[in-house]
Image (cartoon, helix red, strand yellow):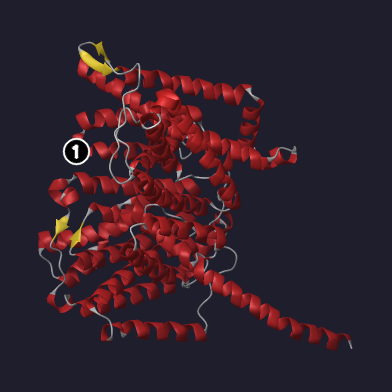
Amino acid sequence: MSFYFAQFLTGLASAASLFLVASGLSIIFGVTRIVNFAHGAFYMLGAYVAFTLTERLSGTFGFWGGILIAALVVALIGVVVEMVLLRRIYKSPELFQLLATFGLTLMVEDIVVLIWGPDDLVGRRAPGFRGAVDFFGQNIPSYDLFLIVLGPVVLGALWLLFRRTRWGILVRAATQDRDMVAALGVNQKWLFTSVFAVGVFLAALGGALQIPRDAVHHAMDLRIIVDVFVVVVIGGLGSITGAFVAAVLVSELNAFGILIFPKISIILVFLVMAAVLIVRPWGLFGKPEAPARKTPGLTVRPWRPLTTNERLAALAALIVAAALPFFGGNYVLTVGAEIAIFVIFAASLHFLMSAGGLASFGHAAYFGLGAYGVAFLAKAAGLPMIACLLLGPLLGLLGAAVFGFFAVQLSGVYFAMLTLAFAQIVWSIAFQWVSVTGGDNGILGVWPAAWAAGPASFYWLSLGIATLMVIVLRIIVFSPFGYALRATRDSILRSEAIGIDGKRIQWTAFVIAGTSAGVAGALFAYLKGSVFPDSLGIPLSVDALVMVLLGGVETVSGAVVGAIVFKALNIWLVSQTDWSKLVLGAIVVLIVVAFPKGIVGMIESIRARRQSQSSKPAILASRIETAE
C-alpha cells in the first residue's frame, strides 16, 4: 500500500509541471484562439536556458534566480514571436495557426542542437531539496513535495490574477467577446501580447523546474506537447481549473497505468481524451465555442473541372513522369515512387479538407493501418502482392469507418483533436502490441513480387495507382455525392433543410479519405520492405497537412503539386544539410504568412489578376461605345 501511495505522490509531482505548461497553453487559446503547437518548444527552451544559467552562471544568479530568469528570457522570446509572426495570423483559421507554430517548433529543435549540442544535459539538484522524506517506509524526494505544493499555489495565483486585477478582467472579457473589448477602446494587440507572454512564461517555468528531475534533450518539446494537448482538451480549452484537474488525472493515469494496465498504459490517456470529446466536446470545465472559422479558401469559389489547356498540361506532365525510368537512375526512381505514394496520401486529405471542410490532425492513422494490413497479409497469410494491395487498405477503411463515426459529430478544433486522439490510440497499440506488430522493431521483409521488384517496375506501379486514385477522387468530387458534401461543408443547416443527411455524407467522405490513405500506406510498405509505428505518428499527419497547404487547399491540383514539392524538398534537404528541420520549418512559416493560398493558388491568383487587367480596356471601350 505504501508503494502505491508513493506512486500517487510521484504522479502529483509530475502533474505540477504539466499543469504549468497546460495552463499557459489554455490561457493563450482562451484569448487569442491560437492552438500553439510551439508551446512545447518554449517548454524546452526554458529547460535549456535554465540549465545554462544554473550550471555555467550559477555564481551570478543562483539556482532559483536562474530558474526565474530563464522563464523571463523565454517569455521575452515569446513576445518577439507574437509580434513578428502570430499577429499576422490571428484571423486565420486554426489550421494555419497550428501549422505556423509547428514550423516554429521544427526551427527551435535544430536551433537548440546548434547551440547546446545533441547530447542530453543533466542538471544539478535544487538547493534545499536534495534529500528525501520517509512516507510509510517509502522515500519521496523532497523536490517532488515542493512541486506538489507549487501546483495549487500557481493555480491560486492565477485565479487571483484573473479575478482581482484589471488586466485579468480584460483578459476574461476578451475570452468572452474580443470585438466588444476592442469597441470599448482596449488595445487588443498589447493585450494579446501580454497574454502570450504570460502563457510562454508558465511553459518555460515548467521546463526550467524539470531540470532537477529529468535530463534536458532536444526531443522534450514533442514529448510534452502531446500530453499538454490531452490535458487542455480534457479540462476544456481556456479553463485554468480544468487544466489543473486534467493534469492530475493524466499524470496519475501515467503513474498507475504502467502498474495496473501495463499492456495498454500508453493508450489510457488517449482513451480518456476520446471519451471526453465524444461525451462533452468542449471538455470537463470548458464552455461550448462559437462555430469555428472555416478552412481558408474553401468557400471562396466552388471547385471547377479542368479546362482543356489544363487537361493537356496534366497529360503532358504525366507522360514526362512515365518516361522517368528511361533517363533516371535507381535512386531517382525510388524517390519518384515515394513521391507518387505521398501524392495519394496528400490527395486523400485534400479531398477531406477541401470538399468536406474537415481538417484531420490524425490522417496518418489510416496510412499506417493500410501499411500494417499489407504486412499482416503478406507475412502471416502469405498472400500474393496483388491480393495484399487490394485487401490491405481495407484495414484503413475499417479504422476510418469506426473513428469517423465519432469524429464527424464534432467540428473545428474539436474534430481535429479527436482525430489526433484516435491516431495516437492506433499508434500506441502498434507500439505496445509487440506480439502482433513487432512494436518498435516493426514488421520486416515485406518485399514486392518479382514482377514489381525492380525500381522501374515499382515506380510505374506507384505512378499508375497514384494517377488512378487522383482521378477517382476527382470523379467523386464532381459527382452528386460530391455536390452534397460541398453543400454540407458550406451550410449544414441549409443542406439538411433540403433533405441531405450531413453527418452521413461527412462520414462517407471520411471513409473514402481513410481508404485512399490506406492505399498509399499499402504501397509504402512494399517500397520500404517494412512497417514501423512511425507510419502512424503525428509527424506524418502534419506532413500531409503541410503538403495540402503548400499546394493550396482551394485548388483542384494543390495536393499533387504540394506533395511533389514537399517530398522532393524534404529528401533533398536531408541529403544536403544537417539542419533540414530549421530550413523546412522556415519554409512552413513562410508559406503560412506570405502564401496562404499555396503554390497553385498563388499562380491562379496571378493569372486571374492579369486576365482582369487585360480585360479592363475592352470593358472600357464597350462602355464608351454604349455611351455614344
Q: Residues within 10 Å of mark 1 (few under 14, many from 20)?
A: some
Q: Position of residue 500 (x, y in %)?
A: 51, 60
Q: Hey, which residue is sitting farthest front in the picture?
A: 59
Q: Is residue 268 left or right of residue 273?
A: left
Query: What's under tag 1, amino acid-wise?
Result: Lys
The location of residue 289, given as percent across then percent down, is 55, 41
List the residue tagged with mark 1.
263
Q: Residue at x 25, y 22 (%)?
A: 7
Instruction: Say if residue 244 shows up in the picture.
Output: no
Given the current orientation, which residue lies at the most extreme right position? Answer: 628
Q: In the rendered image, is residue 523 in sight?
A: yes
In the picture, residue 151 is in which quadrant?
Answer: top left
Left/right placement of residue 374 relative to residue 101 reads left
Q: Secondary structure at mark 1?
A: helix
Taking the spot 50% from the left edge, 64% from the top edge, the residue there is 553
Residue 141 vs 592, above or below: the answer is above
Residue 219 appears left or right of 591: left
Q: Quadrant of residue 54?
A: top left
Q: Which residue is pictured at 39% across the width and 71% down the height?
A: 564
Please tell me which residue lies in front, 118 or 441.
118
Above/below status of 327 relative to 164: below
Q: Tally the numbered discs.
A: 1
Q: Is residue 391 left or right of residue 176?
A: left
Q: Quadrant of the N terminus?
A: top left
Question: Residue 569 or 373: which is nearer the viewer?
Answer: 569
Residue 210 % position (x, y):
35, 30
Q: Nearer the viewer, residue 554 or 599?
A: 599
Residue 540 lies, with reference to residue 226, above or below; the image says below
Percent coordinates x, y for residue 74 in the rendering? 48, 38
- Indicate the quadrant containing the C terminus: top left, top right, bottom left or bottom right: bottom right
